[in-house]
Image: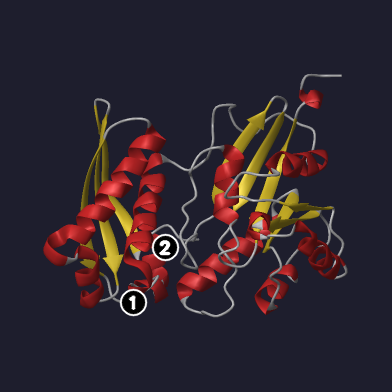
């Protein structure tokens, strides 16, 4: 048996409706925060790859945007294309549901799942149930809707049952050499990750008063010795949104920038100098040309 035959690696898509915990699951599986999270729907907009190498097995997780059923602008159509294309290109699919919750949005995602590859049902937020026995009728209800290769209740937030989930995935990964170096955790560069971390803080520190149609552009990313110098622009749709982001005497923007910088320093393991500006770009979320320039697929 050759050395390559001892190795297994493959792609695993993480899919589900918005806000079921897909990004939190990815971050805990690989042990690093590379996919941003917030309570707002549509936080994840891009395909994010997270890489976990355990001995001779390499799991390449693909975190996808929550499939959009209620919005139809160019941004949402782009996000849905990411979901459907990801499903065609992977070896295993993780279909994530929230414990005891299944509605028409979950049903629409389930109808997208491929019939020609293994689908593992991941029931997230199981830790929120007072009585774990409540899961049994829920599992029975979902099990009759389609065949699942495995059903694994987890708590992504607490990192519980993730080893069980990895064991369920492992048999379906094909033999072959690893696709990435052992120390890689994502195929995204620092410029992309910096933009995502800043966008997360915008969502977290503005709550519901600011629409989700906010984007971030990294206008400059330079290494100055070991210091990363980053200039970023937050794009909003209206002047009123700009005022919300800046806040009284600039305090809101300062808080957003500070928290983003701290996350960047933790992820990049080095000092960051971050300057942030807010710019109005009306209609960017429904402009195919603007979306392409911002890196949307």
Residue 275, horizontal then vertical, whole percent: 20, 48
- State the SS at label 2: helix
Q: Quadrant of residue 168?
A: top right
Q: Which mark is residue 295?
A: none
Where in the figure is residue 44, as x and y percent of width and height? 50, 59
At 24% from the left and 65% from the top, the residue drawn is 245
Left or right: where 108 falls relative to 63: right
Question: Residue placed at 68% from the left, 34% from the top?
Answer: 58
Q: Residues within 10 Å of mark 1 (few under 14, many from 20)?
A: few
Q: Point out the tag, 1 or 2, that comes first from the N-terminus.
A: 1
- Residue 283, numbered circle: 1
Residue 292: numbered disc: 2
Decide: is 170 above or below 182. below
| Quadrant of res 52 | top right
Where is residue 214 shown, x and y percent of the image?
A: 35, 66
Callout in the foreground (1, 2): 1
Tell me: residue 236, above or below residue 1. below
**In which quadrant will I find the N terminus?**
top right
Query: As displayed, is residue 155 above or below residue 60?
Result: below
Q: Residues within 10 Å of mark 2 (few under 14, many from 20)?
A: few
At 47% from the left and 64% from the top, the residue drawn is 39
């Amino acid at each position: 048996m050759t050395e390559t035959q001892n190795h297994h690696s493959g792609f695993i898509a993480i899919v589900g409706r918005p806000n079921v915990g897909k990004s939190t699951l990815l971050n805990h599986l690989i042990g690093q925060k590379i996919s941003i999270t917030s309570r707002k729907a549509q936080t994840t907009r891009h395909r994010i790859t997270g890489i976990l190498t355990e001995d001779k097995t390499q799991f390449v997780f693909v975190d996808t945007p929550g499939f959009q059923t209620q919005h139809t602008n160019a941004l949402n159509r782009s996000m849905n294309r990411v979901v459907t294309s990801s499903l065609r290109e992977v070896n295993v699919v993780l279909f994530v549901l929230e414990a005891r919750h299944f509605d028409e949005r979950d049903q629409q995602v389930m109808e997208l799942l491929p019939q020609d590859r293994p689908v593992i049902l991941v029931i997230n937020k199981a830790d929120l149930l007072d009585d774990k026995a409540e899961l049994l009728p829920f599992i029975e209800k979902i099990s009759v809707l389609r065949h699942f290769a495995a059903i694994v209740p987890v708590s992504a937030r607490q990192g519980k049952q993730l080893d069980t989930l990895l064991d369920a995935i492992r048999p379906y990964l094909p033999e072959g050499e690893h696709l990435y170096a052992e120390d890689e955790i994502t195929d995204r560069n620092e410029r992309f990750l910096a933009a995502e971390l800043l966008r997360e803080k915008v969502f977290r520190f503005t709550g519901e008063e600011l629409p989700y149609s906010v984007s971030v552009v990294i206008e400059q990313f330079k290494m100055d010795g070991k210091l990363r110098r980053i200039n970023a622009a937050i794009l909003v749709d209206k002047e009123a949104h700009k005022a919300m982001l800046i806040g009284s005497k600039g305090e809101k923007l300062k808080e957003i920038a500070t928290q983003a910088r701290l996350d960047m320093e933790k992820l990049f393991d080095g000092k960051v100098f971050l300057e942030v500006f807010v710019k109005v770009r009306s209609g960017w979320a429904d402009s195919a040309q603007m979306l392409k320039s911002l890196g949307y697929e």
